[in-house]
Amino acid sequence: MKKKQFGLPLIQFLVTGIFMLSAYGNIHAQLQDSFDDSDFTTNPTWTGSTENFVINASGQLQLNDLDPVVTQSYLTTSNVMSDLMNKEWHIHAKHTFSGSDSNQSRVYFATDAPATSYSGNTSAGVHGYYLKLGEALSGDVVRVYRDDAGSITLLASTTTDISGSFEIGIRITTDNAGNWSVDIDPTGGTNYINEANFLDNTYSTSSDFSIVCTYTSSNTTKFFYDDIYAGDIFVDTTPPTVISATATSSTTLDVLFSEAMTQISAENEGNFNVVGIGNPATALLDGSNPALVHLTFGSEFVINQTYTISASNIQDIAGNNMISGSTDFLWFESAVATFRDVVFNEILADPTPAVALPESEFVEIHNTHATASFDLSNWSFVNTTTVKTLPAFNLLPGAFVILCDQGNVSQFTSYGDVIGISSFSALSNAGDSLTLLNDVGDIIDVLVYSDSWFDTPSKLEGGWTLEMINPGLPCQTSSNWSESISNTGGTPGAQNSVYDNTADTTSPTVQNVAVTSANTIQVTFTEAMDITGFEIPVWDVIPFNSIIGATWNGTFDQVVLTLQQNLTAPNTYTILINSIADCSGNVIADTNIDFTIGYLPQIGDVIINEIMADPDPQIGMPDAEYVELRNNTSQLLDITALQINSGYFTTQTFIQPDGFIIVADIDDEAMFSSFTNVAFMTSFPSLTNSGMALELSDANNTYDALTLRYVLVS
């Protein structure tokens, strides 16, 4: 067992998005916009490509170019500054894509005119300063440029890597001598770390603030901005608060505060106390995040016990003193997961049209254990062949977590825990293969889902999830899944609407045996089987044959057996199946099944002999269309491969020597229950009353073709 820990409440390791303008005293700001009013057309007024931007559900300014006919969009607003001394600018920026010369943005934070466009790496035709976010480099960072209305000059480069998707906080400050400081919070919050400095006095005034987004068609909604400010340097008047505590071992604890602290107050062991444990032996301020302190205790935490830590007399770098604060944390033991300890529990592959859930794809995973927790660090979520690595996350006993695209996390936070995945692979509406691997590559769960699991046509159209019925069953099977019956369309983050944990006590049976080639037999069971030790089943095929290979399908309810000798026609064989059990351990009863090999028909061997195109009114026969086929030979014929127009058989089908067989649509099967010599096709052609062309064929030959022509007599 490896030991792991996470804080209570469970939150991101570094605080994000906690900055509030009201936390600061008297400021005379020229520009500030947090977009909390869901409006960017007033107070302040942004102009430009306004049709291509929205305020999203998270209160962020977001690019939303739904009909991209250009490669750039911009917004600009007034930012009048009579001087650039002792000023501060900050902005929260997020890109959910990898930057390039064709996918980037510029933030013109101090210019003499609106910046509306630029080409490549050239000037926007204004005088002033801008941030460049994104470029065609692997070590992409935030860069500060001066624009001289015809040329540009690189002034500074930061160190935080933004070459992939990123969400960062940026702050720029100046003094009265032209010294500039560029500070970054790589987590998107306001715990800034200084990453670059430069001296420049070229421009001393400003009139405008602009954002220009450059993009290709795949990134027209992936630019986000928030908490914009330009004005006098802030004066902090609010003391720090405790955000979270996270046990990093049985004797160490990380405490995260809302802002940077003074080293003296953060490293005073007497300022911290854990109920039942006491003061730490040591306290050390983090070297890169001044809002984080590392504590070490002389006594060990008890596994799976919740503790409370209190902090007092903590001072921020502005001199504000916190009287006291507290939070809970848990030291838990992370178990090693095995197959089906964590399961795929719910899927929304087709979110449109939405019922009540977010109109975004998601997959939910569920910890089926009552006592064990699992650390998802470096686990893999595989969609067909696309592998995504999961971050550190403590999946508690019985808990759920939603997996979705990183850009859609805010849509699901109200449902519970969410893990955002960069470039989340699209889920195929018709069906897909999903695999969950632990950190050493062991398969934890496999799911091959299909839209055929929907029973209601309207739900198949979109907006409804597929839910697992009993997550406690030891393997996946289609019979353990159903369409959601929740009136919201699904139950992300909660117990499924179709949940039923009734134990499986029913033994499996053989549903079908079909000959698929001269030396292969396909056996289909009524449920998923435990194939442990049955890679090559020790079953018998009589007479004089043996099984030398076996290939199971992804849901373990069907196996193709390879025989040592070819099967020959016309012969009847018997397969003896025994010993194997279903996933719940219910052993199959010894089963002997006969199957017959017929000759493959040649041209002229099978003909269309009778047609029922207009069964209404009913006179002795079922009220259903059908075609009768005749065997013109004295041999047993296997007609499984034959089609009538687009109709095809889904089970092995024979026609007796000199015999007849009725063929109808699979949907009309119940109407022919009293008939013995009948077979059914999927996509059986609709027979028009006035006449039509029918063709009896397989992939290589046409066996019979005719055009029906007849007159209805009234």
Image (tube, grey):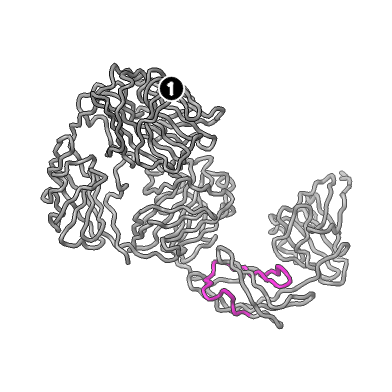
> Helix or strand or loop: what does disc 1 sit on?
loop
Residue 626, magenta (yes or no): no
Q: Quadrant of residue 18?
A: top left
Residue 318 percent across, percent down from the top left: 17, 34
Q: Which residue is mark 1?
A: 115
Does any portion of residue 500 appear in the rendered image? Answer: no
- Vertical arrangement, residue 426 with respect to residue 40, above or below: below
Q: Quadrant of residue 47?
A: top left
- Vertical arrangement, residue 308 with respect to residue 339, above or below: above
Front-lying residue, 481 or 54: 54
- Which quadrant is home to the N terminus? bottom left
Residue 408 percent across, percent down from the top left: 44, 42
**Residue occupying the point 44% across, 36% down:** 134
Q: Quadrant of residue 129?
A: top left
Front-lying residue, 497 or 13: 13
Does any portion of residue 65 appear in the rendered image? Answer: yes
Residue 518 percent across, percent down from the top left: 74, 71
> Hey, what amino acid is under mark 1?
Ala
Residue 610 percent across, percent down from the top left: 85, 57
**Residue occupying the point 15% across, 36% down:** 320
- Image check: 331 left or right of 714? left
- Which quadrant is home to the C terminus? top right
Q: Identify the magenta region.
A: 513-539
Residue 516, magenta (yes or no): yes
